[in-house]
Image (spheres, rainbow, N blue to C red):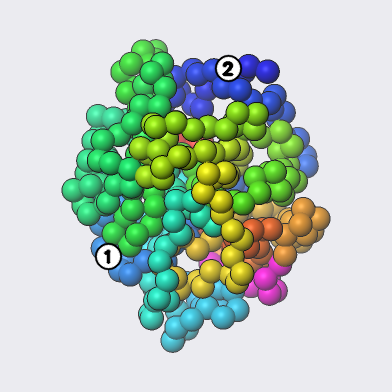
Amino acid sequence: MIKIIMSGPWLAIVLLLASCSTEPDPANTVVLGIAYVGATVASLDDSSGFYASGAAMTAVDTPSLPRASLPVGAPGDGQLLPVRLLRSSNAQLLLMEFSPLADRKPTPVNGPGIAHVCYQVNQTTGAYQRFLAAGAQALGGTDMVQLNASSPVRYAYAEDIDGMVFEVEHVDVQALDLETPPANDYRIRHVSLATPDIDAAVDFYSLLLNEPSPRRLGRLLKLSGEKLDQVSGLPGTSIEMAWFQVRNLELEIIQYHSHPTQRPSAPRPLNAPGYNMIVFDVTDIDVASRRLLEAGGALVGDVRSTHSGQIQYARDPDGNLLGLQRISEDAPLSSMNFSSNGL
């Protein structure tokens, strides 16, 4: 069916070929939000400066992470791992500084794994240009691309100073002619997973997140064209996508049919540069763990103590590292610090 979808007031209404979606039953929901996306970087100072200059991310005072709270095999010496928590209006990154770093490049735009984080901003901020000035490298050209002439949004993919892929969406808020303008000029729109099997990934997250009918695009007719090539930097791009709104942050799933993604033969090292985990706040770790297992995931080790609570690590069917945490709602690493998704 043709459905009118608005992804918040920042986006113009566009017509999308998508399935009907259903509201999750709160009584059956165990995932409360996305606490943070983890990322391994070469320098906490350099990376935090990069994201402060481009996306106005602010550093939040948080203690070093106990290595004992990380999955078994977390490399490095000492009991504490240096970290830096960066916060936007709705979500946050937890930067980690391992020594030594694994000799491995960050995940490319087509995966496999946690492929990118998307920053959606008011175009008047000039965020994309500031990212480039801070050392970002564009993937498909330095000019942003307007994919739909009726939607006042321009897109670009780039690599940060560590080679991690990120997306910027510049929104012409003035063109939306809103009675009430957005409360924030910056937010993190989504974290994106690149998968070799979008149907299997959607099935897994539908059960884990209690959202049986996520928004999808490209099932009948794959998304392609020169403009998409300009964004991704991949010639002949052909993709299919799905989205789950996890209260404060969107989870995007994408399959590159044109550039097939292979499941990794072994888990990505935690000290490899790039995104390394997605951590969810849950109502009950045991209940969330059972649901994850029923959905086809796997647990990693036992429940561990962390800041202000506990965490169970796990992997989805593609091997992506997830965290299921139950911590104090006022702790820095809690998604409960955000009352909305940044609009």
303 part of magenta stretch: yes
Q: Which residue is mark 1?
A: 45
Q: Amino acid at mark 1?
A: Asp
Q: Which residue is mark 2?
A: 4
Residue at 30%, 34% in the rendered image = 144
Measured in 3D between alpha carbons, the distance from the residue under mark 2 to the one under mark 1, in whole angstroms, is 43 Å
Instruction: Check the picture and name the quadrant holding the N terminus.
Output: top right
Q: Amino acid at mark 2?
A: Ile
Q: Is residue 23 above or below residue 159?
A: above
Q: Is residue 300 above or below residue 189?
A: below
Left or right, 195 with respect to 225, comes to right
* Residue 132 visible in the picture: yes
Percent position of residue 36, x then y: 50, 54
Percent position of residue 322, x then y: 61, 60
Residue at 45%, 83% in the rendered image = 76
Q: Secondary structure at mark 1?
A: helix
Crowding near the residue tagged with mark 2, few <14, some 14–19, many ≥20 C-alpha atoms within 10 Å = few
Q: Main secondary structure of the magenta part?
A: strand
Q: Which badge, 2 or 1, comes first in the chain's sequence?
A: 2
